[in-house]
Image (tube, rainbow, N blue to C red):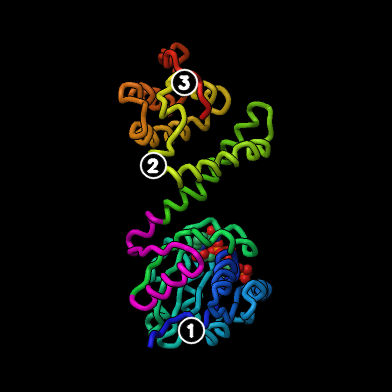
Amino acid sequence: MARFSRESRLGFVGAGRVGCSLAAALSTAGYPVAAAASRAFDSARRLARLAPDAVAYRTPQEAADRVDILFVTTPDDAIRQVASDIRWRAGQGVVHCSGVASLDVLAAPVAVGAVPGAFHPLQAVSSAENGVESLPGATFGIEAEGEMRSYLSEAAEAIGANPIFLRAEDKPIYHLTGVLMGNLLTALGAVSAQLWETFGFSRAEGVKALAPMMRQVSVNLDASGVPGAVAGPYVRGDAGTVRKHLDALAERAPQYLPLYCELALAGLPFALERGPIDERRAAEIRKMLEEFREGPPSPNHPQPETNQGEQPKCA
Ligand SMILES: NC(=O)c1ccc[n+]([C@@H]2O[C@H](COP(=O)([O-])OP(=O)(O)OC[C@H]3O[C@@H](n4cnc5c(N)ncnc54)[C@H](OP(=O)(O)O)[C@@H]3O)[C@@H](O)[C@H]2O)c1
């Protein structure tokens, strides 16, 4: 008989955004979420409200003693210590949700016969109360062997997510893609909105104007992929437009020139793949971006040709 199944009782230590969201999602999918603990008892009680069959305990040990699989959903830096402080039973499951940490942070439970796994939602889970809504459709990066691997894969599917399997050595680069798409895209959104203050609007107005565009970018990327979803002046080869951007940035917010230029340079190969920009126009734009990346060039810098006869289009 399988050691881990849909009947296995689950517990959570660390009742924050991911712990609460995952407990709620698994509970809704019919998995028995039986126990919760956290640093603060109130946090454990919050998780227990979101997963109705769960009981909140004051210590991780009390929660661990009552379950077959314990999810350690603390911040990454606390996982090893929290896992080391618990007395595990041989055959008990222990799972963390970090995307970058490997199974080695679970060395202490493994040493006494516990079965490890890592179960990482590739998602920006921003709230304990409402994060559950963001899990269906997300990809879950799984590192585990044997029965734990099958169990976590089925659990991801049960909550409407997409499981993938990762090797320990690939996790930092895998996780970095999530940070680029989540945290650093948010930083790019913040910079873009901040620039609205340079032409008389507030940053909040910038967010309001740009967020629908960000949503549509995601829809386009999902629907058309790369390079199909790549759009804007780079794909068209509008060197004159790019030059205007660079001049405006040099005048109003030169601190963002390196960021803009690096991003545009990184995107040029995909614009070329998509077209109609050709290699000659791309080389001209590349040269401009490389110059401005180092700071605004001298005032007599030659202007690029603009595309003759083309109608201006929106980004
Ligand atoms: N947020 C995301 O978008 C996201 C996405 C994917 C994966 N993850 C991963 O999920 C895990 C949890 O992240 P999170 O964002 O949910 O963090 P979080 O919201 O900060 O929640 C962590 C929870 O752990 C509790 N905690 C901290 N130290 C503890 C300890 N020593 N013992 C027991 N409980 C402790 C916290 O304390 P209190 O009891 O004081 O509340 C808090 O409720 C991390 O491994 C993270 O890498 C996060």
Q: Which amino acid type is shown beneath numbered disc 1? A: Asp
Which of marks 3 and 1 precedes in the sequence?
Answer: 1
Q: Nearer the viewer, residue 272 or 79?
A: 272
Q: Secondary structure at mark 2?
A: helix
> What secondary structure prevails in the magenta region?
helix
Estimate the spatial distance between the alpha carbons at disc 3 and disc 2, rounded to whole Å: 25 Å
Query: Which range of residues does the magenta coloring cover?
Result: 146-174
Q: Secondary structure at mark 3?
A: helix
* Rendering coords of residue 315 (x, y %): 51, 30
Q: What residue is rendered at 40% in x and 38% in y? A: 228
Q: Circle 1: is it few (<14), some (14-19), or many (20+) Cα within 10 Å?
A: many
In the rendered view, tell whether residue 11 sits above or below residue 1: above
Estimate the spatial distance between the alpha carbons at disc 1 and disc 3, rounded to whole Å: 61 Å
**Per the image, is 59 magenta?**
no
Q: What residue is rendered at 45% in x and 45% in y? A: 223
Q: What residue is rendered at 57% in x and 82% in y? A: 63
